[in-house]
Image (cartoon, rainbow, N blue to C red):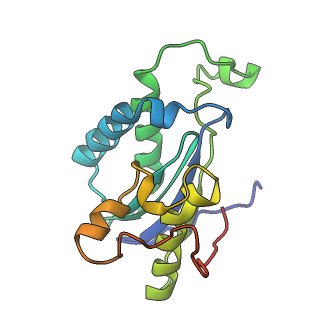
Amino acid sequence: MSNYRRFKIQGGCYFFTVNLNDRKQSLLIDHIELLRDAMRFVKAKHPFQIESIVILPEHLHCIWTLPENDADFSLRWRQIKAAFSSKLPKGENRSSSRIKKNERGIWQRRFWEHAIRDERDYENHVDYIYFNPVKHGLVNAVADWPYSSFHQDVKRGIYPSSWGGKYVEKVNVVGE
C-alpha cells in the first residue's frame, strides 16, 4: 500500500466511495443535514460539482467534477469529514493510533476514487450509485431511497422513475 498513488487529473471527473469507520452505524442518514451542510461548506471554499450521489447509513458513493486547474479531491474529502465529525458528539471508539494523532474515529481514513474514463464509464458508475440502496436491501426500488440525486435526474428526464425497480434486468456493476 505504501506505493499507492492517487491518479489526479486537473478538472477531472471522479467516482468516490467513502465509508464510516464503524460500518454498523447509520450516522450518515441519521445526521443527513450535517453531512449536507459539511458538503455545502466545503463547496463554498473549494468548488466542485456533484454529478450524482447516494448516501447510505454507513457509506456514500458519488461522482464529482473538479474545476479546471484543480485536482485536489483529497483536501475536499478531508475537510468534509472534519466538518461533519466536528458537529457530532464525541464518544466513538478510537484506536490508540487515532488517540495519539488526536483524530476522531468516525470515518475510515482512506476512500476509494476512480477517474472516470469516458461516457460509458460515467453511465455505469451513475447506475451503480443509484442502484446501491437496492443492492444493499434497503429498498426494493431506486425511487424509494430518499438520499439520492436520482430524484433530480428523474425530474431532468435522464432516468424514468421506475428505473432500478425490483425486476431490473441488469445494472452494470463496478467495484466498491
Give the side of residue 30 with respect to residue 158, left or right: right
Give the side of residue 3 with respect to residue 156, left or right: right
Q: Nearer the viewer, residue 95 or 174?
A: 174
Residue ID at (47%, 41%): 78
User: Percent from the top left, x then y, of residue 95?
Assistant: 74, 22
Residue 33 versus residue 96 in the image, above or below: below
Quadrant for residue 34, please give it. Answer: top left
Instruction: State whether residue 109 appears in this view.
Output: yes
| The N terminus, quarter of image | bottom right
User: Percent from the top left, x then y, of residue 106?
Assistant: 58, 29
Q: Nearer the viewer, residue 43 or 75?
A: 43
Quadrant for residue 39, please give it. Answer: top left
Give the side of residue 48 with respect to residue 111, left or right: left
Give the side of residue 70 with respect to residue 77, left or right: left
User: Percent from the top left, x then y, of residue 47?
Assistant: 26, 54
Residue ID at (58%, 35%): 107
Residue ID at (46%, 46%): 77
Residue 134 versus residue 173 in the image, above or below: above
